């Protein structure tokens, strides 16, 4: 199923300001939040879709990439869900240009002695919000090419060694004259390496590397955000016949949390409040990311949409000792499944209510009456 355009998902134009995108996200997230739509799978899907769109458009660099490449800019061919890896796109592009222009320019770019650096690899890792809050050290298993221990990466059988290529004399290039021109190209005998292997290693068949699953340790610092990239230098694919290894890039994805929504270093928690608690005021107990809880004083007459700010209770800011804030977003819940006595009490309350009890609704319907009265006067 094709993904919808992220701007369409949030209901904003492609030239929308960052503040408009954030505002649209907040409204839709409140509307389709699972707590407000229990058991509604369609609302749950839309909530995930909204979060994915906002994550791509809130960051200027990611938004620019999306504007240019569309969904292909975030293609996760390895899959964030179960972890995976693939050769880095930049490395693949480099190989493509080498194939197209390497011989024409007198040899492959980025190679010395024909030995090409190993490919960069990508590993997609999904972590919990708590892991991003505290940081962690994770163990990952990566199947990749490593140096062959039998030949120490040379590609030649133990006890032997590569010999100087007879075709190019070790230069890695050969020349041919055509009329007034002398053309230099990669030696076809040794592939530009300047040496050949007469007796290949039986284990790696002359490549100098074998496929093996490795266990690596990854340090995830506190405060990382979605799509953070962690580089492990030299942990990528081993190069052919002793060439340097590439790098391994860990791309992080943070799982949605049951209670919290993240916006940079700030955390938002939607808290349903009973009608009586909102009317009478009091205190509520809410969870915090540091595995604790805190009490929030709710003033008398609190309305839906009211936010309470808890300073320093948000996410840690990467590479600093500072923290963002936590915002409690109140949603007043209308009572349902009333008993007879409850209905009688509410009906009695409605009879004794006044303009001061419901100033907004009273004022609104008064203006509506004036509006319709104006139509009658114009006739």
Image: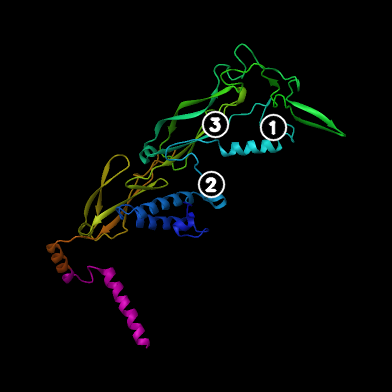
Residue denoted by label 3? 247
Residue denoted by label 1? 108
- Marks 2/1: CA distance? 28 Å
Which quarter of the figure has residue 91? top right
The residue sitting at the right extreme is 180
Secondary structure type for disc 1: loop
- Marks 1/3: CA distance? 20 Å
Residue drawn where x is 30% and y is 59% of the image: 304
- In the picture, the disc for residue 73 is 2
* Magenta region includes residue 372: yes
The answer to whether residue 319 shows anywhere in this view is no
Task: Please provide percent x and percent y for residue 266.
Answer: 38, 47
Residue drawn where x is 66% and y is 31% of the image: 110
94 and 368: which is toward the camera:
94
Label whose residue precedes the other's in the sequence (1 or 3) = 1
Give the answer, above or below, for where 79 lies relative to 50: above
- In the picture, the disc for residue 184 is none
């Amino acid at each position: 199923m094709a993904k919808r355009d992220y701007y369409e998902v949030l209901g904003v134009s492609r030239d929308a300001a960052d503040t408009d995108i954030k505002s649209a996200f907040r409204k839709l997230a409140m509307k389709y939040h699972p707590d407000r739509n229990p058991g509604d799978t369609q609302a749950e899907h839309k909530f995930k879709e909204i979060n994915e769109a906002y994550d791509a458009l809130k960051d200027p660099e990611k938004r620019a990439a999306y504007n240019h490449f569309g969904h292909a800019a975030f293609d996760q061919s390895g899959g964030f869900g179960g972890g995976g890896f693939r050769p880095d796109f930049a490395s693949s592009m480099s190989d493509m240009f080498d194939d197209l222009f390497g011989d024409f320019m007198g040899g492959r770019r980025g190679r010395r002695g024909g030995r090409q650096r190993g490919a960069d690899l990508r590993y997609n890792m999904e972590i919990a919000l708590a892991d991003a809050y505290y940081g962690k050290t994770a163990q990952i298993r990566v199947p990749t090419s490593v140096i062959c221990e039998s030949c120490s990466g040379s590609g030649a059988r133990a006890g032997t060694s590569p010999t100087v290529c007879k075709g190019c004399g070790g230069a890695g290039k050969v020349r041919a004259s055509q009329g007034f021109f002398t053309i230099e190209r990669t030696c076809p005998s040794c592939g530009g390496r300047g040496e050949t292997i007469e007796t290949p290693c039986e284990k790696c068949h002359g490549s100098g590397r074998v496929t093996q699953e490795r266990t690596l340790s990854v340090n995830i610092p506190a405060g990382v955000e979605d799509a953070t990239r962690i580089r492990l230098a030299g942990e990528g694919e081993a190069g052919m016949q002793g060439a340097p290894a590439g790098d391994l890039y860990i791309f992080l994805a943070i799982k949605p949390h049951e209670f919290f929504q993240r916006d940079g270093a700030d955390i938002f928690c939607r808290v349903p409040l009973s009608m009586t608690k909102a009317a009478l005021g009091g205190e509520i107990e809410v969870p915090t990311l540091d595995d604790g809880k805190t009490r929030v004083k709710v003033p008398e007459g609190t309305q839906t949409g009211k936010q309470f700010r808890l300073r320093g209770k948000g996410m840690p800011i990467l590479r600093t000792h500072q923290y963002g804030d936590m915002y409690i977003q109140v949603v007043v819940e209308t009572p349902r499944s009333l008993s007879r006595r409850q209905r009688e009490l509410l009906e009695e309350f409605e009879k004794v209510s006044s303009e001061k009890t419901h100033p907004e609704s009273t004022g609104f319907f008064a203006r509506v009456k004036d509006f319709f009265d104006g139509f009658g006067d114009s006739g």
